[in-house]
Amino acid sequence: MNTIFIILGILLVSGGVIIYFVKAGKIKDSDGDLIPDAVEDAVEDVKETVAEVKERAKVVKEEVKDVVKAVKGRKRRGRKPKSKK
C-alpha cells in the first residue's frame, strides 16, 4: 500500500514541476493547454506511425491470402495416370 502512495506522490511532484516550468516559460507551450509542445509532437508522430502500420498490415493480410490461395493450388483435372507395375 505504501508503494502506491510513493508512486502517486512522485507523479504529483513531477506533474507540479512540469506545470511550474511551463508557467515560467522554461518549457515551450504555444497553445497554453499545459501540455509541452514536445509531448504533443511526439503524440502526433505516434499517431502517424500507427496509421502507417495499420495500412501495411492490411496489405500484408491481402498478400498472405494470395499466397495461401496459390499454395493450395487447383485440383487435378482429367483421368488419373495408370499405375506402373
Image (cartoon, rainbow, N blue to C red):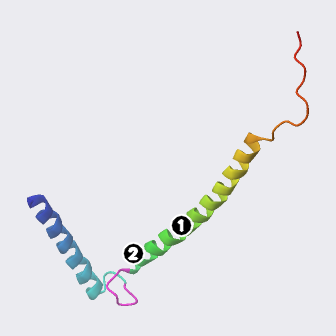
For label 1, the crowd category at 10 Å Cα-Cα, with few meaning under 14, some 14 to 19 and many 20 or more, is: few
The answer to which quarter of the image holds residue 73 is top right
Identify which amino acid the numbered label 2 is placed on.
Answer: Val
Residue range in magenta is 29-36
Q: Image point 48% across, 69% down: which residue?
A: 46
- In this rendering, the answer to whether 33 lies above or below 41 is below
Q: Earlier in the sequence, mark 2 or mark 1?
A: 2
- In this rendering, the answer to whether 10 lies above or below 72 is below
Give the position of the N terminus as an image quadrant: bottom left
For label 2, the crowd category at 10 Å Cα-Cα, with few meaning under 14, some 14 to 19 and many 20 or more, is: few
x, y percent for residue 28: 37, 83
Magenta residues: mostly which secondary structure?
loop
The residue singled out by tag 1 in the image is 49
Element class at badge 1: helix
The answer to which quarter of the image holds residue 72 is top right
For residue 25: magenta? no
x, y percent for residue 62: 68, 56
- In this rendering, the answer to whether 81 lies above or below 62 is above
Of badges 2 and 1, the one in the foreground is 1
Q: Image point 34% across, 88% down: which residue?
A: 33
Q: Which of 49 and 84 is in front in this view?
A: 84
Identify which amino acid the numbered label 1 is placed on.
Answer: Thr
Q: Nearer the viewer, residue 62 or 12?
A: 62
Checking the image for residue 7, the label placed there is: none
What is the distance, in whole Å, between disc 2 and disc 1 at their CAs?
15 Å
Q: Image point 45% across, 76% down: which residue?
A: 41
